[in-house]
Structure formats: C-alpha cells, structure tokens
Image: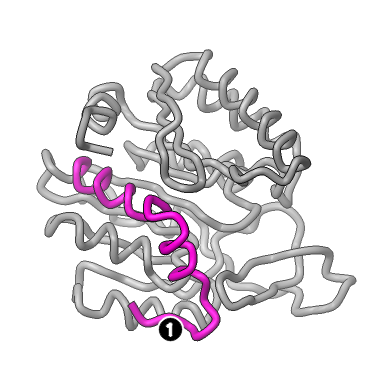
Amino acid sequence: MVLPPDHKLPYYQRRDPTYDEYAGRIVGELARDVDKLLMIDLGANVGDTAVLALASADNVDVRCVEGSARYAGYCRRNVARFGERATVIERFVGPVGKHRKFVETGTTAGFYGDVTEGGDAPDGTDWLTPTELLEGADEYPRVLWKTDIDGFDIHILVEHWDVIRANCEVLWFEFDPPGTLGDRSDIARLCELVGSSGLDMVVYDNLGRRMFSMPAGPAAGTSLLGLARWLDDIRLGHLTVQYLDVWLMPTALAARVCADGAA
C-alpha cells in the first residue's frame, strides 16, 4: 500500500490488529459459492478496503468510488496490480443532505460544517447516483454494497434504499449516528428499513470485533435504534467505540459468516 505521509492507517493497524483485517475474511466467505462477486466500495479512500477484498478471493471485483482527487490517485496506485478487477471512479455519490464544505486531512476527506464557514462548497458537483453506480451489477450473482463516507452513510441508504436493496444482496455500512451530517430523523427511518428488510444483521465495533448478530425481523431494527442511542451516550463519555460496522445479509450467509473461523 502506498499512503500519504501523514495517513494514520499504520498507526491504527499497530494499535488495533483487528481494525481492518476482519472484513477480508467475510468478503472471501461471501465469494466462496458464486462465480463472481462485485463490491461497491463507496468512500474508498486510498483503496485499503478494496485491496483487502480483492486479495480475499480471485472472483471478487471492486468498484472504488472516491470523490477526493488526492485519495483517488492513491487508490488507483494501490489497486493497479489487480488489473480489470478493480475500477476507480472519481465522483461523489448523491446528492444527499445539505451541501457542506469539503475538507481533506491526512487520513480522510469529506463534507463538514456549513458552507458559510469557508472552504469549497460542492455546488455544481457532478453527482453520481446509486442507479448509475450500480449499472451492470445484474451481471454478478452477488453484489456487496459498502459505504464509509463520514457522516452521510445513513442518509445515502435511506434516500436510495429501494435501488440499493434491489441490486445488492449484502449491505455493509458505517453506523455513526452521533456524527451524522444530514436529517437526524433518517436514523430512525434506517432502523425501520433494516427491520423490514428480511435480512439478518451482524454488528462489529469500530475495531473489527464482532459484537452480536440478529435474525431478520423488526427486532433487528429496534436493536439498531438502541445502538444509536448507546453510541450517542458513549461518544459523550469519550469511550473507545466511536461507530459500528453493520452488515445485512440473508440468513444462510449470516450463519456462514458467524461460524467459527469465518469472522
């Protein structure tokens, strides 16, 4: 992996060895019984998750989506060795929520604050819709939707749920209610959608440790809403768990993922 000099990924990996390694085992398991798996990597950053997925199995393709030109450049370099199995799309997916100023740090990039505070407002941004992003996805027997877009994950899912759910058998998203940047009522709306999705839910903490799994049904949505409140509480207390990784998938796949040795 080639990283910006001030990127914090090596620090996180040294501090928490499970931080980003668990997902590769899950992707490999999801790819085991299909000819091809497509992962939509929304918020690809430098391509670290994409490399993990591509290396997990030879039948995994990844569409890396990164709006920052700087990080998209690093992403292209890091996935280049996988050839046509990896595609890098330098676009922002949306529109969703209010337009915010765009900020880059050494480790991440995203829309923060209000555009009146300065910075580059994304007015005129050539937004990529989930419908466009998923074009041709029906050629794959299994599609995994992954988002890590710093404050907009919940809102992208809520506003584009029907399209995403119709095309993607498995969903994986960062769940960070305290850091959400759109309409906070979308938190409860997403929990309702999860509860009615017919998909099992498997939850990991932000260090990649599995917390629990829930069978499909309204209780999954209720549990997710309870987790949203818990995250609000612990964020105020400055504790370790800042956000969660939530996976939604059919029951048979969840059973395999949660089996000993799979994740």
Quick one: 211 or 32, which is closer to the camera? Answer: 211
Is residue 20 a member of the stretch shown in magenta? yes
Q: Give the residue type that dot 1 points to.
A: Gly
Say which quadrant the N terminus sits in: bottom left
Image quadrant in which you'd find residue 256: top left
Quick one: 184 or 261, which is closer to the camera? Answer: 261
> To which residue does mark 1 refer?
73
Where residue 176 appears, x then y in whole percent?
62, 44
The residue lying at 50 percent from left, 20 percent from top is: 220
The stretch in magenta equals 1-30
* Element class at badge 1: helix
| 3 is higher (above) or lower (below) than 216 | below
Say which quadrant the C terminus sits in: top left
The residue lying at 54 percent from left, 61 percent from top is: 93
The residue lying at 33 percent from left, 63 percent from top is: 50
Where residue 121 appears, x then y in whole percent?
76, 74
In the orientation shown, which residue stands out farthest toward the right? 116
Tell me if mark 1 has few (under 14), some (14-19) or many (20+) residues whose alpha carbon lies within 10 angstroms of its own.
some
Where residue 191 appears, x then y in whole percent?
59, 27
Quick one: 69 or 236, which is closer to the camera? Answer: 236
Image quadrant in which you'd find residue 142: top left
